[in-house]
Image (tube, rainbow, N blue to C red):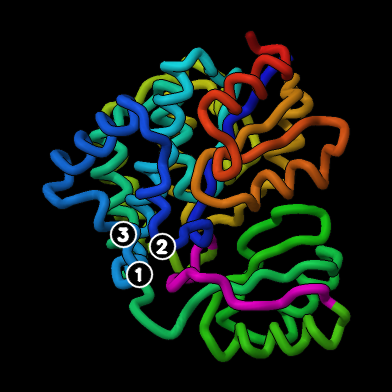
Amino acid sequence: MSIAFLFPGQGAQSPGFLHRLPDHPAVAATLAEATAVLGREVLELDQDVALQSTVAVQLGLLVAGVAVARALAAEGVVPAMVAGLSVGSFAAAVTAGAVGFADALRLVDRRARLMEQACPAGFGMVAVTGLTQRRVEAIVAAAGPPLYLANLNAPAEFVLSGADAALDRAIEAAQQAGARRAERLAVAVPSHCPLMDDAAAALTAAVESAPVTAPHILMVGNRRARMLRDAAAVREELATNLAHPVRWSDSVTLMAEHGATAFLEMPPGTVLTRLAAAEFPDLTARCMEGLSLPGARAFAARSGDR
């Protein structure tokens, strides 16, 4: 039996999420390391004003995921496989031993700045729930550019990226089509679409110059929903996933097919837990937002990992 760690992406953040991390030496060490590498106080990244910045959000998500994964490892809870949604892929890569934490911090800082520069204002993302993929694709086509299908999170849960006016048209069309939910996300850039092509090209150069190795444990990528077994595959994922749709539903399915019997979502947020539980009700899924470290140890033990 195997436990899979899931690392959330942008949109999962909430004010104070770094201050809610477990009180553990590994967490404290991770926060101190990040502060030293970035040259800024990391615990300021989760404040209301700071969270308006894509840079602060993405760095905060990376720090939170790595900090808790390290604390869990210190307590004997080690995953058999990992996956991260969008920027969560960087925390997954660190946990899998493919990228050093300091290098990941620098790359995520570069990634977020490139994304902000690519579309500085007037863009975002919308979540649509309760419609089929074919119906959502028809809404995207009818709404007109620039609008793209960005995330395939579940059979009836999707995220769109694009300009504000196109997103507004898509929300109205989705509501008329009977969507259970169609609303803007707390994301200020249009991720996972061709609007990020130039940013991905620039990020590729930075990723190519960073030390990357084959993962020590199984790692699933967003872009192709495949296992990343060597350094080249990890590089491609980290450098380019920001410009390609996130195939999250396929990624979770792949982990289940490779033997994952339990999913544990790193902070912040609960969305990935909900998605996993909905698609695989026979498997167990929990999030660290609602678990203490001892609770996580007990969860892992019940899942057969200890």
Q: For the residues carrying marks 2 and 3, which lies nearer the camera in this image?
A: 2
Label 2: which secondary element: loop
Q: Which of marks 2 and 1 is nearer the N terminus?
A: 2
Direction from residue 150 to residue 106 in the image, left or right = left
Q: In this view, does 231 lie to the left or right of 85?
A: left
Give the residues drawn in magenta, as a range: 179-192
Residue bearing mark 1: 48
Whether tag 2 and tag 3 are in contact, CB under 8 A, the answer is no
Q: Confirm whether the magenta stretch covers residue 36.
A: no
Where disc 1 sits, the SS reads loop
Per the image, the residue denoted by label 2 is: 15
Q: Please name whichever residue, 15 or 117, is drawn nearer the observer in this view of the structure.
A: 15
Seen in the picture, residue 37 relative to 298 is either above or below; the reply is below
Look at 86% across and 82% down and name the residue there: 177
Give the camera-side residue of 261 and 20: 20
Q: Residue 231, located in which quarter of the rendered image?
A: top left
Q: Residue at x 45, y 49 (%)?
A: 87
Q: Which residue is drawn at 76% across and 23% down?
A: 261
Q: In this view of the protein, which residue sits in the foreground, 282 or 224?
A: 282
Q: Mark 3 points at which residue?
A: 56
CA–CA distance in space, label 2 to label 3 = 12 Å
Q: In this image, 19 relative to 169: left or right?
A: left
Q: Which sits earlier in the primary sequence, circle 2 or circle 3? A: 2
